Amino acid sequence: MSDIVANERRRQALYGWIMLSPAAILLTTFAFYPSLATFWTSLFSRETRRRPSEFKGIGNYTDLFADPTFLKVVTNNLIYAFSTIPISIIIALAMALWANSKIPARGFIRTAYFTPTVLPMIAAANLWLFFYTPGFGVLDQIGSFFGIPSINWLGQPQTALWSVIIVTIWKEAGFFMIFYLAALQTIPEDLKEAADIEGCSRWTYTRRVIIPLLMPTTLFIMVNALINSVKLIDHLFILTKGGPNDASKLVLYYIWEMAFAFFDAPHAAALTILVLAVLGVVAGIKFMILDKRTHYQ
């Protein structure tokens, strides 16, 4: 009898490993091994023809924190994240609430909101060049009717980063709206009928019923928006290339610049590890704290 039980356990264990092996192979090949290789690279100095690579330990990390460009880039990314994430979520929720209501041409409105999401970021950036081009762009053409002088939106440190932020919000709000729209359609109509019987206003119903029930979706969108705030750099290549004077340079663009423009792989690897560490901390907070405070039912 014991032999039969042991064989059954081994069979189930083997079956489990067979089911897990595709995901384990993919994660090891494209996530775990590259991360470990990047961390190992970050511990050595830059190799040149005359000087071989040497072990530096945390030297590359301390170099980054002493670099004013790194501090500027981190500040830019924080401004970028804390601007794009909440504004995109608020706009997406407002669009979803409107698109989910009983209004004429509801299908057309949903399609119009979602259209920017279909465009690649490169195409969206090229489209916005027609708005930002000094003297010829749509914004300057509109401003000229009111006597406003031409503004170099992408060529001034004061406006370059905010111009990039606007493009990101325009691109992402429609994408996040789809998640909110799907979540809204799962909310039972009985709750709205009960709120009407109790005499609740539309604002009270939205604030006390809709928003709490949408918290799982909001948390999911926040995580995705945070990841996007680190990984989206396509529009920078078209709009500003990180300029002027590093005013719009973001972390991932800086990593690319160090690795492929300056050929400084160790410092690029060190910055990559720092980004992964920050995202890991955020993921830990999400799973251990925020998930427990989210109303799933």
Image (spheres, rainbow, N blue to C red):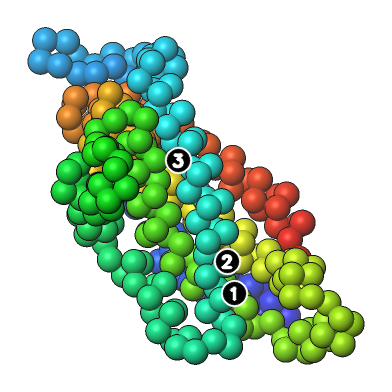
Going by the numbered disc 1, the residue's amino acid type is Leu
- In this rendering, position of residue 199 left or right of residue 27: right
Q: Residue at x 86, y 81 (%)?
A: 199
Q: Residues within 10 Å of mark 2 (few under 14, many from 20)?
A: many
Residue at which label 3 appears: 80
- In this rendering, position of residue 84 left or right of residue 120: right
Q: Which mark is residue 135?
A: none
Image location of residue 5, percent across then percent down: 69, 77
Image location of residue 273, percent across then percent down: 43, 33
Which quadrant is the C terminus positioned in?
bottom right
Q: Does the rendering let one see residue 256?
A: no
Residue at which label 1 appears: 97
Image location of residue 41, percent across then percent down: 32, 28
In whole angstroms, how far apart are the C-alphas of marks 3 and 2?
A: 20 Å
Closer-to-camera residue (227/145): 145
Judged from this view, the residue extending furthest toward the top is: 50
Where disc 1 sits, the SS reads helix
Q: Residues within 10 Å of mark 1 (few under 14, many from 20)?
A: some
Relative to 11, residue 236 above or below: above
Where disc 3 sits, the SS reads helix
Q: Residues within 10 Å of mark 3 (few under 14, many from 20)?
A: many
**Mark toward the start of the polypeptide (3 vs 2):** 3
Of tags 3 and 1, the one toward the viewer is: 1
Image location of residue 272, percent across then percent down: 39, 34
Q: Does the rendering let one see residue 67?
A: yes
Where disc 2 sits, the SS reads helix
Labels 1 & 2 near each other (Cβ < 8 A): yes
In whole angstroms, how far apart are the C-alphas of marks 1 and 2?
A: 6 Å
